[in-house]
Image: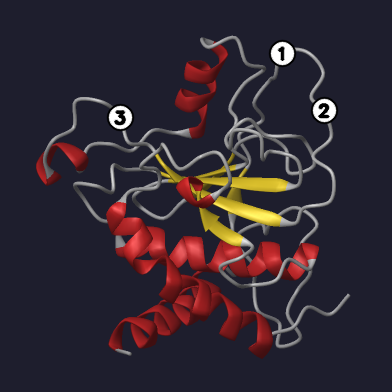
Amino acid sequence: TLFRSLLMDALQMFDQGSQQSSSVAGAPTGKNGDTLASVVETNLSFSGDLSPLGKPERIAIHHTGPDGVTSAEQEASVDPSAAEIHEMHKGKGWGGIGYHFVIRKNGSIERGRPEDKLGTHVYHNNTGTLGIHVGGHFDYGKPTDAQVKSLTGLLRDLCSKYGIPADRQHIMGHKEFPENADTACPGSNMMSILDDIVKNVASAVTASPASN
């Protein structure tokens, strides 16, 4: 489809544009020398000891979805940083940010909770689940092209790194996890494109297998 073609073009641009940046910590490099997802290290401090994640087996996609947003115009300003979410989650009594990655509207990827630590983002399903927060309220607005590009590249890299199957049984919207159907997260406009994103991730993983 046209959407899939645009996503594949975006992924190629993602590889080219990441060449001067650091990659996902510990991630392998593709056999063609593809540069992996650039992640901004935030060096956040967490309260208490964080439990281990366990073997990563699934990835949950989230949005911000704040109360009070009722239009696309309002949604355009919903773009919290990892540090802002970190403070918000600390205010709930958590050790810090519950997500492992935060993707801003400009496409930058910020480090949240360490990848090897248990997150707090999917009720009763956090063990073995990596959490990616994409900034916005996707019942009213849509992910930016830069966010879609970065999400596709990050998913590709995490699937390659951990051997997570690039399919919709392992890459899921928050609401698709058991006991989480009562949430609207990650929003209808993210859910409507998630199938195509995952198909492109699967194509990219197949085209550029990791060389461990």
Q: CA distance from mark 3 to mark 1?
A: 25 Å
- Residue 150 position, x and y percent, is 48, 62
Give the vertical position of 67 relative to 60 (above or below).
Answer: above
Upstream in the sequence, badge 2 or badge 3? 2
What color scheme is it? secondary structure
Q: Residue at x 47, y 18 (%)?
A: 88
* Residue pointed to by mark 1: 47
Q: Considering the numbered disc 1 on the image, is that residue within a helix, a strand or a loop?
A: loop
Crowd around label 2: few <14 · some 14–19 · many ≥20 (10 Å): few
State whether residue 20 appears in this view. Answer: no
Q: Is residue 93 left or right of residue 164?
A: left
* Residue identifier under label 2: 51
Residue 66 got which mark? 3
Q: Where does the image place residue 201, in percent across and percent down from the top left?
A: 56, 75
Residue 124 lies, with reference to residue 170, above or below; the image says above
Q: Is residue 204 above or below residue 146?
A: below
Marks 1 and 2, Cα distance to the nearest angstrom? Answer: 12 Å
